[in-house]
Amino acid sequence: MYAVFRKELADHFNSRRFMILFLLALLAAVFAIYVAIQNIRSVVTADTEFIFLKIFTTSGETLPSFLFFISLFIAIIGIALGFDAISSERVSGNLSRLLSQPIYRDAVINGKFLAGLTVLGIIVASLVAIVSGLGLRTIGVPPNSEEVLRLIVFVLISIIYGAFWMALSVLFSVFFNRAATSMLASIGLWIFFAFFMSMIAGAIANARVPIDTNSSLEMITQNVQIAGAIGRISPATLYGEATAALLVPELGSLNPAMMLISTYIAGRMLTPLPFSQSLLLVWPQLVSVVALAAICFAVSYIKFMREEIRSI
Protein backbone atom coordinates (compact mmCIF):
# COMPACT_ATOMS: atom_id res chain seq x y z
CA MET A 1 0.00 0.00 0.00
CA TYR A 2 2.86 2.39 0.74
CA ALA A 3 4.23 1.95 -2.77
CA VAL A 4 0.83 2.72 -4.30
CA PHE A 5 0.44 5.66 -1.92
CA ARG A 6 3.79 7.19 -2.92
CA LYS A 7 3.12 6.68 -6.62
CA GLU A 8 -0.34 8.27 -6.45
CA LEU A 9 0.94 11.13 -4.33
CA ALA A 10 3.68 11.88 -6.85
CA ASP A 11 1.16 11.70 -9.71
CA HIS A 12 -1.13 14.17 -7.95
CA PHE A 13 1.60 16.70 -7.24
CA ASN A 14 2.99 16.48 -10.78
CA SER A 15 -0.38 16.74 -12.51
CA ARG A 16 -1.79 19.87 -14.08
CA ARG A 17 -5.09 19.10 -12.41
CA PHE A 18 -3.56 19.68 -8.98
CA MET A 19 -1.96 22.97 -10.01
CA ILE A 20 -5.18 24.28 -11.58
CA LEU A 21 -7.30 23.33 -8.57
CA PHE A 22 -4.84 24.80 -6.09
CA LEU A 23 -4.48 28.05 -8.04
CA LEU A 24 -8.25 28.46 -8.34
CA ALA A 25 -8.74 27.81 -4.63
CA LEU A 26 -5.88 30.19 -3.79
CA LEU A 27 -7.35 32.90 -6.01
CA ALA A 28 -10.73 32.53 -4.32
CA ALA A 29 -9.07 32.68 -0.89
CA VAL A 30 -7.19 35.88 -1.81
CA PHE A 31 -10.41 37.53 -3.02
CA ALA A 32 -12.18 36.42 0.16
CA ILE A 33 -9.48 37.79 2.44
CA TYR A 34 -9.49 41.06 0.50
CA VAL A 35 -13.25 41.39 1.00
CA ALA A 36 -12.92 40.52 4.68
CA ILE A 37 -10.22 43.13 5.25
CA GLN A 38 -12.29 45.81 3.50
CA ASN A 39 -15.42 45.07 5.54
CA ILE A 40 -14.07 43.84 8.88
CA ARG A 41 -14.32 47.27 10.51
CA SER A 42 -18.08 47.26 10.01
CA VAL A 43 -18.50 44.03 12.02
CA VAL A 44 -15.93 44.69 14.74
CA THR A 45 -16.60 46.91 17.76
CA ALA A 46 -14.70 47.65 20.93
CA ASP A 47 -16.40 44.73 22.71
CA THR A 48 -15.99 42.19 19.90
CA GLU A 49 -14.23 38.98 20.82
CA PHE A 50 -12.55 36.55 18.42
CA ILE A 51 -11.62 39.27 15.96
CA PHE A 52 -9.25 36.96 14.11
CA LEU A 53 -12.07 34.55 13.24
CA LYS A 54 -13.96 37.39 11.54
CA ILE A 55 -11.44 37.14 8.70
CA PHE A 56 -12.96 33.80 7.68
CA THR A 57 -16.63 34.75 8.05
CA THR A 58 -16.85 38.39 6.93
CA SER A 59 -18.41 38.89 3.50
CA GLY A 60 -18.89 41.91 1.27
CA GLU A 61 -21.64 43.27 -0.90
CA THR A 62 -20.41 41.56 -4.07
CA LEU A 63 -18.28 38.65 -2.86
CA PRO A 64 -19.05 36.06 -0.16
CA SER A 65 -16.79 35.06 2.70
CA PHE A 66 -13.86 32.66 2.72
CA LEU A 67 -16.10 30.09 4.43
CA PHE A 68 -18.44 30.10 1.43
CA PHE A 69 -15.61 29.76 -1.08
CA ILE A 70 -13.92 26.89 0.71
CA SER A 71 -17.20 24.99 1.10
CA LEU A 72 -17.52 25.01 -2.69
CA PHE A 73 -13.93 24.25 -3.57
CA ILE A 74 -13.49 21.43 -1.05
CA ALA A 75 -16.26 19.42 -2.74
CA ILE A 76 -14.83 20.14 -6.20
CA ILE A 77 -11.30 19.18 -5.14
CA GLY A 78 -12.53 15.98 -3.48
CA ILE A 79 -14.41 14.98 -6.63
CA ALA A 80 -11.45 15.83 -8.86
CA LEU A 81 -9.11 13.66 -6.79
CA GLY A 82 -11.28 10.54 -6.92
CA PHE A 83 -13.53 10.43 -9.98
CA ASP A 84 -10.98 8.52 -12.11
CA ALA A 85 -9.17 6.62 -9.36
CA ILE A 86 -10.26 3.18 -10.59
CA SER A 87 -12.06 3.76 -13.89
CA SER A 88 -9.04 5.28 -15.65
CA GLU A 89 -6.83 2.40 -14.54
CA ARG A 90 -9.44 -0.11 -15.72
CA VAL A 91 -9.95 1.46 -19.14
CA SER A 92 -6.22 1.84 -19.83
CA GLY A 93 -5.55 -1.76 -18.83
CA ASN A 94 -3.12 -0.75 -16.09
CA LEU A 95 -5.32 -2.22 -13.37
CA SER A 96 -4.95 -5.80 -14.57
CA ARG A 97 -1.19 -5.33 -14.98
CA LEU A 98 -0.94 -3.82 -11.52
CA LEU A 99 -2.86 -6.64 -9.87
CA SER A 100 -0.75 -9.23 -11.70
CA GLN A 101 2.12 -8.04 -9.51
CA PRO A 102 2.44 -9.10 -5.84
CA ILE A 103 0.08 -6.32 -4.76
CA TYR A 104 -3.17 -6.94 -2.93
CA ARG A 105 -6.39 -5.38 -4.18
CA ASP A 106 -7.06 -3.55 -0.94
CA ALA A 107 -3.61 -1.98 -1.14
CA VAL A 108 -4.58 -0.40 -4.47
CA ILE A 109 -7.81 1.26 -3.38
CA ASN A 110 -6.51 2.14 0.09
CA GLY A 111 -3.32 3.65 -1.29
CA LYS A 112 -5.21 5.73 -3.85
CA PHE A 113 -7.70 7.00 -1.28
CA LEU A 114 -5.03 7.88 1.29
CA ALA A 115 -2.97 9.69 -1.34
CA GLY A 116 -5.98 11.77 -2.37
CA LEU A 117 -6.81 12.46 1.27
CA THR A 118 -3.24 13.64 1.90
CA VAL A 119 -3.35 16.01 -1.06
CA LEU A 120 -6.73 17.32 0.08
CA GLY A 121 -5.40 17.91 3.59
CA ILE A 122 -2.36 19.77 2.27
CA ILE A 123 -4.53 22.04 0.11
CA VAL A 124 -6.99 22.88 2.90
CA ALA A 125 -4.30 23.45 5.52
CA SER A 126 -2.29 25.60 3.09
CA LEU A 127 -5.27 27.79 2.23
CA VAL A 128 -6.16 28.34 5.89
CA ALA A 129 -2.52 29.10 6.72
CA ILE A 130 -2.22 31.58 3.83
CA VAL A 131 -5.43 33.37 4.79
CA SER A 132 -4.35 33.44 8.44
CA GLY A 133 -0.96 34.90 7.52
CA LEU A 134 -2.45 37.59 5.28
CA GLY A 135 -5.05 38.44 7.89
CA LEU A 136 -2.48 38.62 10.68
CA ARG A 137 -0.26 40.92 8.62
CA THR A 138 -3.17 43.17 7.68
CA ILE A 139 -5.23 43.55 10.85
CA GLY A 140 -2.30 43.10 13.24
CA VAL A 141 -4.34 41.14 15.81
CA PRO A 142 -2.84 37.72 16.61
CA PRO A 143 -5.19 34.82 17.35
CA ASN A 144 -5.52 33.57 20.90
CA SER A 145 -5.23 29.93 21.87
CA GLU A 146 -8.97 29.25 21.54
CA GLU A 147 -9.07 30.74 18.04
CA VAL A 148 -6.15 28.52 17.03
CA LEU A 149 -7.99 25.46 18.36
CA ARG A 150 -11.13 26.43 16.46
CA LEU A 151 -9.16 26.84 13.24
CA ILE A 152 -7.47 23.44 13.71
CA VAL A 153 -10.84 21.72 14.18
CA PHE A 154 -12.18 23.71 11.21
CA VAL A 155 -9.38 22.31 9.05
CA LEU A 156 -10.08 18.76 10.27
CA ILE A 157 -13.81 19.06 9.57
CA SER A 158 -13.08 20.49 6.12
CA ILE A 159 -10.80 17.55 5.33
CA ILE A 160 -13.46 15.10 6.49
CA TYR A 161 -16.05 16.86 4.34
CA GLY A 162 -13.73 16.68 1.34
CA ALA A 163 -13.09 13.01 2.14
CA PHE A 164 -16.81 12.34 1.80
CA TRP A 165 -16.91 13.75 -1.73
CA MET A 166 -13.72 11.93 -2.64
CA ALA A 167 -15.14 8.66 -1.28
CA LEU A 168 -18.33 9.27 -3.26
CA SER A 169 -16.38 9.92 -6.47
CA VAL A 170 -14.27 6.80 -5.86
CA LEU A 171 -17.52 4.88 -5.42
CA PHE A 172 -18.75 6.08 -8.82
CA SER A 173 -15.32 5.36 -10.27
CA VAL A 174 -15.66 1.73 -9.15
CA PHE A 175 -19.22 1.35 -10.46
CA PHE A 176 -18.78 3.12 -13.80
CA ASN A 177 -16.26 2.17 -16.45
CA ARG A 178 -15.85 5.67 -17.86
CA ALA A 179 -14.21 8.49 -15.91
CA ALA A 180 -16.51 11.05 -17.56
CA THR A 181 -19.60 9.22 -16.31
CA SER A 182 -18.14 9.04 -12.82
CA MET A 183 -17.34 12.75 -12.85
CA LEU A 184 -20.80 13.75 -14.11
CA ALA A 185 -22.53 11.59 -11.51
CA SER A 186 -20.42 13.09 -8.71
CA ILE A 187 -20.90 16.68 -9.86
CA GLY A 188 -24.62 16.12 -10.40
CA LEU A 189 -25.04 14.83 -6.86
CA TRP A 190 -23.01 17.73 -5.49
CA ILE A 191 -25.17 20.27 -7.35
CA PHE A 192 -28.30 18.58 -6.03
CA PHE A 193 -27.14 18.63 -2.41
CA ALA A 194 -25.56 22.09 -2.52
CA PHE A 195 -28.23 24.02 -4.41
CA PHE A 196 -31.47 22.10 -4.89
CA MET A 197 -31.79 20.38 -1.51
CA SER A 198 -32.58 23.64 0.28
CA MET A 199 -35.26 24.45 -2.32
CA ILE A 200 -36.84 21.01 -1.89
CA ALA A 201 -36.73 21.35 1.90
CA GLY A 202 -38.39 24.77 1.70
CA ALA A 203 -41.09 23.49 -0.65
CA ILE A 204 -41.92 20.55 1.61
CA ALA A 205 -42.00 22.81 4.66
CA ASN A 206 -44.33 25.27 2.91
CA ALA A 207 -46.59 22.39 1.90
CA ARG A 208 -46.75 21.10 5.47
CA VAL A 209 -47.00 24.48 7.22
CA PRO A 210 -47.95 27.28 4.80
CA ILE A 211 -46.81 30.71 5.94
CA ASP A 212 -47.17 34.29 4.75
CA THR A 213 -46.51 37.77 6.07
CA ASN A 214 -49.39 37.46 8.56
CA SER A 215 -48.33 34.09 9.99
CA SER A 216 -47.60 33.77 13.68
CA LEU A 217 -44.15 33.16 15.06
CA GLU A 218 -45.19 29.63 16.03
CA MET A 219 -46.12 28.72 12.45
CA ILE A 220 -42.95 30.30 11.08
CA THR A 221 -40.92 28.36 13.64
CA GLN A 222 -42.56 25.07 12.63
CA ASN A 223 -41.91 25.82 8.97
CA VAL A 224 -38.24 26.59 9.58
CA GLN A 225 -37.82 23.53 11.79
CA ILE A 226 -39.21 21.19 9.12
CA ALA A 227 -37.05 22.75 6.44
CA GLY A 228 -33.96 22.47 8.64
CA ALA A 229 -34.60 18.82 9.45
CA ILE A 230 -35.00 17.91 5.78
CA GLY A 231 -32.03 20.06 4.76
CA ARG A 232 -29.73 18.09 7.07
CA ILE A 233 -29.96 15.21 4.62
CA SER A 234 -27.43 17.19 2.59
CA PRO A 235 -23.76 16.87 3.65
CA ALA A 236 -23.29 20.49 2.54
CA THR A 237 -25.81 21.60 5.17
CA LEU A 238 -24.08 19.54 7.87
CA TYR A 239 -20.72 21.03 6.95
CA GLY A 240 -22.12 24.56 6.85
CA GLU A 241 -23.66 24.22 10.30
CA ALA A 242 -20.53 22.70 11.82
CA THR A 243 -18.15 25.33 10.44
CA ALA A 244 -20.51 28.19 11.30
CA ALA A 245 -20.70 27.08 14.93
CA LEU A 246 -16.91 26.80 15.12
CA LEU A 247 -16.01 30.09 13.45
CA VAL A 248 -18.89 32.08 14.98
CA PRO A 249 -18.72 31.38 18.74
CA GLU A 250 -21.71 33.69 19.33
CA LEU A 251 -23.90 31.11 17.58
CA GLY A 252 -25.44 29.35 20.53
CA SER A 253 -27.67 26.83 18.74
CA LEU A 254 -27.94 25.00 15.43
CA ASN A 255 -31.64 24.42 15.84
CA PRO A 256 -33.31 26.44 13.05
CA ALA A 257 -36.27 27.26 15.29
CA MET A 258 -34.04 28.58 18.09
CA MET A 259 -31.98 30.58 15.60
CA LEU A 260 -35.15 32.13 14.20
CA ILE A 261 -36.47 33.02 17.66
CA SER A 262 -33.16 34.58 18.66
CA THR A 263 -33.21 36.62 15.44
CA TYR A 264 -36.71 37.94 16.21
CA ILE A 265 -36.07 38.64 19.88
CA ALA A 266 -32.47 39.31 20.83
CA GLY A 267 -30.22 38.43 17.91
CA ARG A 268 -27.21 36.25 18.51
CA MET A 269 -26.04 35.29 21.95
CA LEU A 270 -24.07 38.13 23.57
CA THR A 271 -21.75 35.71 25.35
CA PRO A 272 -19.70 33.51 23.00
CA LEU A 273 -19.66 29.81 23.70
CA PRO A 274 -16.40 28.28 24.93
CA PHE A 275 -14.57 25.94 22.62
CA SER A 276 -15.74 22.79 24.41
CA GLN A 277 -19.39 23.80 24.09
CA SER A 278 -19.02 24.67 20.40
CA LEU A 279 -17.40 21.28 19.85
CA LEU A 280 -20.32 19.54 21.54
CA LEU A 281 -22.67 21.61 19.39
CA VAL A 282 -21.10 20.43 16.12
CA TRP A 283 -20.47 16.84 17.23
CA PRO A 284 -23.65 15.38 15.62
CA GLN A 285 -22.83 17.05 12.30
CA LEU A 286 -19.23 15.84 12.45
CA VAL A 287 -20.24 12.25 13.21
CA SER A 288 -22.80 12.32 10.39
CA VAL A 289 -20.24 13.46 7.79
CA VAL A 290 -17.72 10.86 9.00
CA ALA A 291 -20.38 8.15 8.78
CA LEU A 292 -21.36 9.18 5.24
CA ALA A 293 -17.73 9.15 4.10
CA ALA A 294 -17.13 5.76 5.73
CA ILE A 295 -20.24 4.25 4.12
CA CYS A 296 -19.28 5.49 0.64
CA PHE A 297 -15.75 4.18 0.93
CA ALA A 298 -16.89 0.86 2.44
CA VAL A 299 -19.30 0.24 -0.45
CA SER A 300 -16.63 1.08 -3.04
CA TYR A 301 -14.11 -1.12 -1.18
CA ILE A 302 -16.45 -4.13 -1.14
CA LYS A 303 -17.42 -3.66 -4.79
CA PHE A 304 -13.79 -3.35 -5.88
CA MET A 305 -12.71 -6.40 -3.90
CA ARG A 306 -15.44 -8.58 -5.42
CA GLU A 307 -15.49 -7.48 -9.04
CA GLU A 308 -13.84 -9.45 -11.82
CA ILE A 309 -10.92 -7.67 -13.46
CA ARG A 310 -9.88 -8.80 -16.92
CA SER A 311 -6.98 -7.73 -19.03
CA ILE A 312 -7.79 -5.59 -22.06
Image (cartoon, rainbow, N blue to C red):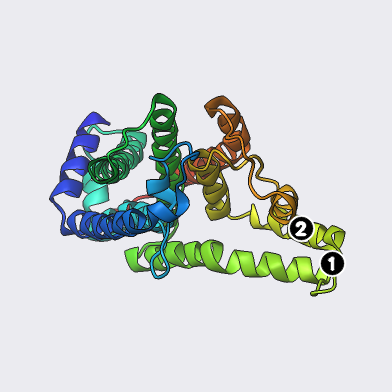
> Which is nearer the N-term, disc 2 or disc 1?
1
Name the image quarter holding the C terminus.
Answer: bottom left
Q: Nearer the viewer, residue 217 or 163?
A: 217
The single residue placed furthest to the front in the displayed view is 46
At a point 53% along the width and 50% down the height, the residue shown is: 240
At a point 21% along the width and 54% down the height, the residue shown is: 18
Q: Nearer the viewer, residue 259 or 180?
A: 259
At a point 41% along the width and 40% down the height, the residue shown is: 51
Residue 229 picture location, percent across and down: 71, 53
Amino acid at dot 1: Val
Residue 148 picture location, percent across and down: 38, 30
Where, by quadrant of the figure, is residue 192 drawn?
Answer: bottom right
At a point 74% along the width and 48% down the height, the residue shown is: 258
In terms of secondary structure, where does tag 1 sit?
loop
Where, by quadrant of the figure, is residue 280 drawn?
Answer: top right
Residue at the disc numbered 2:
226
Contact check, label 2 and label 1, Cβ < 8 Å:
yes
Q: Is residue 22 above or below residue 50?
A: below
Q: Is residue 306 visible?
A: no
Residue 311 picture location, percent across and down: 26, 54
Amino acid at dot 2: Ile
In terms of secondary structure, where does tag 2 sit?
helix
* Residue 209's disc number: 1
Looking at the image, residue 300 sits to the left or right of residue 4; the answer is right
Q: Is residue 24 above or below residue 9?
A: below
Name the image quarter holding the N terminus.
Answer: top left
Q: Nearer the viewer, residue 238 or 14?
A: 238
Residue 193 picture location, percent across and down: 55, 61
